[in-house]
Image (cartoon, rainbow, N blue to C red):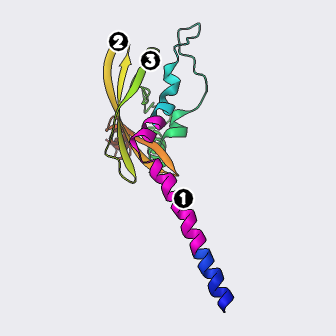
Amino acid sequence: MKNRVFVFAAAVLLLTACNGGAKKADAAKHTDAYIRERVETIYSRYLTKELDENGMRVFKDNTDLTDTYCSTGFKSLLAQAQDAAGEDYIVLDCDPWTQSQDDVEFTCSVKSVDAITDSTATVTLATENFGYAGQLTLQLVYESGDWFVDDFGGDLREYLQSFLDGE
């Protein structure tokens, strides 16, 4: 009986210690600095100015940004909207990451990280494309141990939802 109590107590202590380490790692990801770094990593592909023979930007990797860095909910909504629109309709007629159809001159930097909660954060990017300065607001959600983009500009999800609502 004493052995069972001891084993149970040891298991509880071990689980508590492991969970405390996870909480510390998790807390480190809920900082302005970490979120900035995450968004800068996502947008790093746009920092190169190397162009191909057709004047199109050459990316160092072929990562599908939407598949890799968007939330599960956003990817699901995008797929549902495309299904509702039909295969002959292009739901997104511009790149949501740059808010443009042509990103050869696109550059950006993190302007601010705001409203950090346990599960959401808002990031504002200062952008420039073809000499036009602007900004892009990203809504992030924390899932699967990291931050993922859940909305672009604050209204892309609403636009995608309109396909499901028949509007």
Q: Nearer the viewer, mark 3 or mark 1?
A: 1
Q: Nearer the viewer, mark 1 or mark 2?
A: 1
Residue type at tag 2: Gly
Which residue does the numbered mark 1 point to in the structure image?
Answer: 21
For the point 51% across and 62% down, the residue is 20
Q: Cα distance, mark 3 to mark 1?
A: 44 Å
Q: Main secondary structure of the magenta part?
A: helix
In the image, residue 47 above or below residue 81: above
Q: Is residue 14 magenta?
A: yes
Q: What segment carries the magenta color?
A: 13-38
Residue 42 at x, y percent in the picture: 50, 33
Q: Cα distance, mark 1 to mark 2?
A: 46 Å
Residue 155 at x, y percent in the picture: 32, 38
Which residue does the numbered mark 2 point to in the structure image?
Answer: 131
User: How would you rate the neighbour count of disc 2 (Cα within 10 Å): few for under 14, some for 14-19, many for 20 or more?
Assistant: few
Q: Quadrant of the N terminus?
A: bottom right
